Image (cartoon, rainbow, N blue to C red):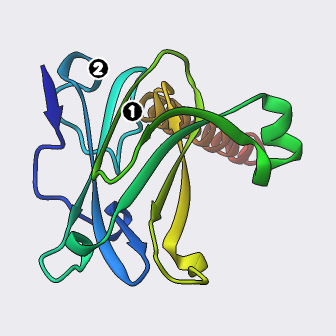
Amino acid sequence: MLLAHAGVDHGDNCFVHLAGMKLRLGGFQAESKIGGGKHFCHLFPATGEVIFTFDALPDSQLKQKKLNLKLLAAASVWDILFDFDNSFKQTLSQADNSLTIKHTIPNMGLYAMQVSLQSDELEPSINNSQRFVFLVGFPIIKILVLIGFGFVLVLAYVLLKQLQAGAAKKH
């Protein structure tokens, strides 16, 4: 079973601005992977089947234009570290004239999505294309909880040492 992001949390980080239009980004993934419909804007997708959708807002002119989507992977970690602008060359999936793209991502890593509008203008604007990068397969929430727990332990240790130093000065 695939679930969309359940809930009404549509913060600004869930919108893509493209050629003067505002598109809402949504993500779908198997319920077993993300615990029942967490919103992609706040939770990075796990490995496995991933579906991204773009919903045009009511005042959008998207119905009259073609949206092309590409999921991209980096050829190597070396490229990500030393040639980031050109690192995402491997096309995993492509959907032309669509608002949805779907792919099964088997490995953890850094991926990108290229979103572009086809244009019949002689000189299309650079604003007609946007690429964003996302992590797949990293347990971000667990990592943040562990970092927070580690911070609390360090803080407790420092306070304990301060109390011991203050007690030693009194004696």
Q: Distance between the residues labelled 1 and 2?
A: 8 Å
Residue underneath mark 2: 33
Residue underneath mark 1: 45
Count of numbered tags: 2
Front-lying residue, 31 or 170: 31
- The answer to whether marks 1 and 2 mark residues whose Cβ atoms lie closer than 8 Å is yes
Task: Give the residue drawn at x 89%, y 44%.
Answer: 82
Residue 42 visible, this angle: yes
Task: Give the residue drawn at x 85%, y 47%.
Answer: 83
Front-lying residue, 102 or 65: 65
Which residue type does callout 1 highlight?
Pro
Which quadrant of the view contains residue 161? top right
Residue 80, percent from left and from top: 78, 40
- In this rendering, position of residue 74 left or right of residue 67: right
Q: Quadrant of the N terminus?
A: top left
Residue 153 visible, this angle: no
Furthest-right residue in view?
A: 82
Residue 96, percent from left and from top: 38, 49
Residue 15 lies, with reference to residue 142, above or below; the image says below
Residue 112, percent from left and from top: 56, 44
Residue 92, percent from left and from top: 53, 30
Crowding at mark 2 (Cα within 10 Å: few <14, some 14-19, many 20+): some
Which secondary structure, mark 1? Answer: loop
Task: Give the residue drawn at x 86%, y 32%.
Answer: 78
Task: Give the residue drawn at x 68%, y 46%.
Answer: 162
Q: In which quarter of the image is the C terminus?
A: top right
Front-lying residue, 163 or 37: 37
- In this rendering, position of residue 19 left or right of residue 157: left
Crowding at mark 1 (Cα within 10 Å: few <14, some 14-19, many 20+): many
Which quadrant of the view contains residue 32? top left
Residue 40 lies, with reference to residue 21, above or below; the image says above
